[in-house]
Amino acid sequence: MNATTRRYGLIALRALLTLAFGAAGTAKLFGVPDMVAVFDAIGWGQWFRYLTGVIEVAAAILLWVPGRQALAAAALVVTMIGAVIAHLAILGPSAVPALVLGLIAVTVLAAYRDQLARQ
């Protein structure tokens, strides 16, 4: 893969993650009824919805801050691991969307892994 293709591919992946997590995090923070219901089902309280929303929105922003892409992607990977577990153990019916977003975040994390040594 040449450098130009890699560069634009990473921009596209970061844009996809930004759109997905910006929207999902905002929905959590604004208390969209579906999000409230999901976190009721998880059983950890609504504070956890707010925490997850803040992490998602912050990570969506940090994906565009030079030198912080790895941190943002790592936060999203951890968040999606939790989402996959929640879907498999509690929520059902499918963990596939969380798994796909998590794999995209892993790809971004791998691409920016050199930033982790500088943190």
Image (cartoon, grey):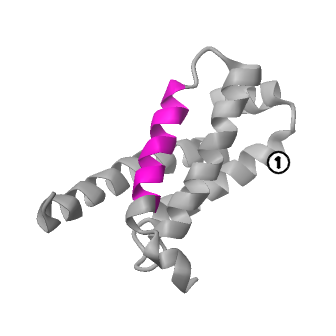
Is 17 on the left or on the right of 98, as rendered? left
Which residue is more in the foreground, 58 or 101? 101
Image-quadrant location for residue 39: top right
Q: In what element is the residue under mark 1?
A: helix
Crowd band around label 1 with a 10 angstrom C-alpha radius: few (<14), some (14–19), many (20+): few
- Residue at x 47%, y 65% (from the top left corner): 61
Residue 113 visible to an observer of this rendering = yes
Q: Residue 53 appears at what percent x and percent y?
A: 64, 50
Residue 113 to residue 73: above or below:
below
55 part of magenta stretch: no
Quadrant in the picture for residue 119: bottom right
**Residue at 57% of width from left, 63% of height from top?**
58
Q: Left or right? Give the position of 34 relative to 59.
A: right
Point 44% across, 79% down: residue: 67
Q: In which quarter of the image is residue 45?
A: top right
Q: Mark 1 points at which residue?
A: 47
Whether residue 108 is in magenta: the answer is yes
- Residue 72 sits above or below residue 22 on the image: below
Q: Percent position (x, y) of residue 85?
A: 70, 32
Position of 85 relative to 105 (above/below):
above
Q: In this view, does 39 lie to the left or right of 115?
A: right
Span of residues in magenta: 96-109
What's the amino acid at mark 1?
Answer: Trp
